[in-house]
Image (cartoon, helix red, strand yellow):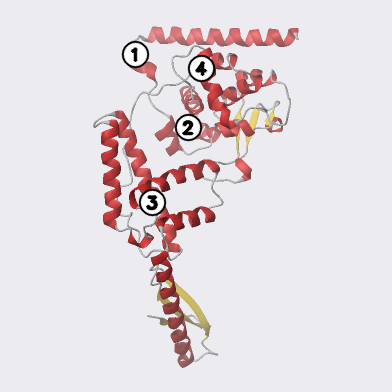
């Protein structure tokens, strides 16, 4: 029903959209020039227009399948990074495998949505076992699938494909899993750098460990972004697009990182020229084996380690989160945790001795690099 309202000196038509339920408004004209009878006649025309649009939208909604809308959704979301596209493809696949690619979007009801969640939970119970850490981690995947489905149907409501969001009533949060975090030490990071197959790959490890850069940030870093005088790195978001996860920031260059980068030959604009994102993981696996680590290090582990090192050094939390380029909430949930060493039973004197040994090894490494550079 179209309602005629007064909006100051103007007539205004107001109604609730039959598809989305949102309040819609349209100006009709100045009250001094348009009579009430004329304004009501315009309201009837608007009502006919809304009715025709609604019928067409409902017909369109009845014909749109999950597969069709998935393709349309990706075509509209040109702002997504490649990593985000891969993530959304994964969750769309989970939805389609359970519901069916040929199922109409409007046919997905609350019961269908609840059935998908139960199916994912049962699959996780069989795959991981009840009351296990793996099962607790799987709950995060299930919750994220529900949150993404809620996003897809919300966008579909905006496009008048569906009239309701069946995922709104489902639980979409998962409890945090507190487990010991395996963090890299300075000695392990230096061993990885020495075991690198090239200077550029060693620089990649150093950037991720000593500056806390993400892998793709380190790979795209250019020499022009390094201020040697101020000892800072300038990190730009991919393609210059600022998002909630990627933003412009300046990071302090640690002395160890400065020594490592100074020894790298400049063969191109990028610091890590010649290192590809596709092979970086394979090269890190190889370096972990050559370095004699008991586990395979990850680039995310390096970033987590830097977060905890800076916090242990007493830096303010706002400084640490600014250098790493994420919010305090993300840092507390995904990066900080209880290091593995605190679960071992050792005295305070042993901890002090361990820290002194680390400091001594770092000094020896720095002196060795300085001596090599001077002789060269």
Q: Residue furthest right?
A: 376
Element type where label 3 sits in the image: helix
Q: Is residue 297 left or right of residue 344?
A: right
Instruction: Please give the name of the residue rendered at 44% of the width and 30% of the height, measured from the top-left corner.
Output: 335
Whole-Å distance between the Cαs marked 3 and 2?
34 Å
227 or 163, which is in the foreground?
A: 163
Q: Residue furthest front?
A: 102
- What label sits on residue 317 in the rendered view? 2
The image position of residue 269, as x and y in percent, is 72, 31
- What label sits on residue 149 in the rendered view? 3
Mark 3 closeness class: few <14, some 14–19, many ≥20 residues within 10 Å: many
Mark nearer the N terminus (1 vs 4): 4
Mark 2 closeness class: few <14, some 14–19, many ≥20 residues within 10 Å: some
Mark nearer the N terminus (1 vs 3): 3
Q: Nearer the viewer, mark 3 or mark 2?
A: 3
Is 238 above or below relative to 21?
above
Mark nearer the N terminus (2 vs 1): 2
Whole-Å distance between the Cαs marked 1 and 4?
24 Å
The image position of residue 137, as x and y in percent, is 34, 34
Circle 1 residue = 344
Q: Is residue 261 left or right of residue 361?
A: right
Circle 4 residue = 288
Q: Nearer the viewer, mark 2 or mark 1?
A: 1
Whole-Å distance between the Cαs marked 1 and 3?
42 Å
Is 318 above or below relative to 355?
below
């Amino acid at each position: 029903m179209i309602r005629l309202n007064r909006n100051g000196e103007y007539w205004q038509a107001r109604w609730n959209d039959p598809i989305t339920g949102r309040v819609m408004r349209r100006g009709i004209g100045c009250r001094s020039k348009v009579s009430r009878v004329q304004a009501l006649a315009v309201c009837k025309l608007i009502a006919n227009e809304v009715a025709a649009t609604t019928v067409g939208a409902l017909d369109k909604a009845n014909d749109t399948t999950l597969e069709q809308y998935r393709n349309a959704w990706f075509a509209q979301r040109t702002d997504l990074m490649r990593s985000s596209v891969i993530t959304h493809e994964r969750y769309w696949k989970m939805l389609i495998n359970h519901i069916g690619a040929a199922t109409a979007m409007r046919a997905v009801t609350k019961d269908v949505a609840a059935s998908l969640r139960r199916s994912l939970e049962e699959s996780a119970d069989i795959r991981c076992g009840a009351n296990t850490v793996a099962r607790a981690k799987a709950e995060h995947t299930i919750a994220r699938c529900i949150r993404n489905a809620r996003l897809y149907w919300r966008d579909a409501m905006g496009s008048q494909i569906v009239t309701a969001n069946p995922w709104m009533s489902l639980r979409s949060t998962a409890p945090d899993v507190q487990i010991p975090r395996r963090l890299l030490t300075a000695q392990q990071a230096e061993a990885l750098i020495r075991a690198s197959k090239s200077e550029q790959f060693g620089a990649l490890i150093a950037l991720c460990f000593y500056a806390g850069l993400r892998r793709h940030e380190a790979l795209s870093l250019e020499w022009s972004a390094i201020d040697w005088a101020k000892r800072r790195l300038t990190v730009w978001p991919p393609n210059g697009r600022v998002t909630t996860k990627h933003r412009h920031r300046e990071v302090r260059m640690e002395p160890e990182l400065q020594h490592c980068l100074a020894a790298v030959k400049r063969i191109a604009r990028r610091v890590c020229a010649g290192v590809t994102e596709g092979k970086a993981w394979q090269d890190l696996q190889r370096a972990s084996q050559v370095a004699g680590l008991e586990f395979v290090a990850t680039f995310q582990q390096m970033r987590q380690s830097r977060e905890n090192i800076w916090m242990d050094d007493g830096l303010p939390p706002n400084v640490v989160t600014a250098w790493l380029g994420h919010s305090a909430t993300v840092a507390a949930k995904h990066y900080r945790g209880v290091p593995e060493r605190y679960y071992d039973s050792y005295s305070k004197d042993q901890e002090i001795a361990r820290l002194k040994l680390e400091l001594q090894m770092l000094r020896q490494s720095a002196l060795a690099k300085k001596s090599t550079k001077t002789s060269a």
